[in-house]
Amino acid sequence: MHDDSEKSLTEAMNFAMRSLASKESGERELADRLLRQGVDEAMAAEVVARCKASGWVDDARYAGMLVRSLARRHYGPQKVRFELRRKGITGGQAETALDAEDIDWFTLAADWLARKGAGSDLSDPRVRAKLARALLGRGFVQDQVRHALDELKGSSSHKE
């Protein structure tokens, strides 16, 4: 019986290593993958602990990577926080990762809006509302939305 558990631990570790080689993951994400593979909870916890001890899985590193990736795709801080929580990154770790990346969310919102809202009639309240909803849906907060709309309005008034 002991040999079977050693064998299945080895198989679980091999699966975890293959999984981590193909896709960076957080602890919870790796544990979920192991459970879906049929590994029991105790063994999944052991595998995650070993991977963490070896530095193969690191929630802080993973959180930083997620923040950078989502910011490059012009998502705001609310969306980033939501995705971090969804991936199992705790509140404290999420905030640390957000702070460590030092992202200018105001500029990010303005950049996205400059690309997507260029040529829009900002004197029309419905157009402004539509653009604001789009930014809010991407996870930007009200102040960042207002800033982005003001930047777009300022840049379009210079062209006239």
Image (cartoon, grey):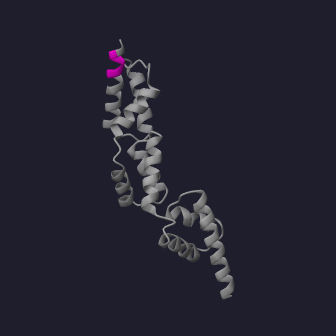
Is 104 magenta? The answer is no
At horizontal 40% and vertical 27% (from top left) the residue drawn is 129
Please tell me whether residue 41 is drawn above or below residue 21 in the rendered image. Answer: below
Q: State the residue at coordinates (31%, 21%).
A: 154
Query: Measured along the vertical axis of the image, is residue 46 above or below residue 123?
Result: below
Residue farthest toward the top in the current orientation of the protein: 160
Which residue occupies the foreground of this view, 66 or 56?
A: 56
Q: Is residue 155 magenta?
A: yes
Task: Report which quarter residue 125 is drawn in.
Answer: top left
Residue 108: give x, y in percent of width and height. 38, 37
Q: Please provide percent x and percent y for residue 118.
A: 44, 22
Report how many numbered discs are placed on residues in the image: 0
- State which quarter of the image contains the N terminus: bottom right
Q: State whether residue 107 is above or below residue 65.
A: above
Q: Is residue 160 left or right of residue 13?
A: left
State the extent of the magenta-drawn residues as a range. Answer: 154-158
- Establish if 150 lies above or below 108: above
Which one is in front, 30 or 21? 21
What residue is at 36 percent from the left and 14 percent from the top? 159
Q: Residue at x 44, y 56 (%)?
A: 63
Residue situated in front as seen by the camera: 68 or 145: 68
Q: Quadrant of the C terminus?
A: top left
Please provide percent x and percent y for residue 10.
Answer: 64, 76
Relative image position of residue 55 (x, y in whole percent): 48, 68
Q: Main secondary structure of the magenta part?
A: helix
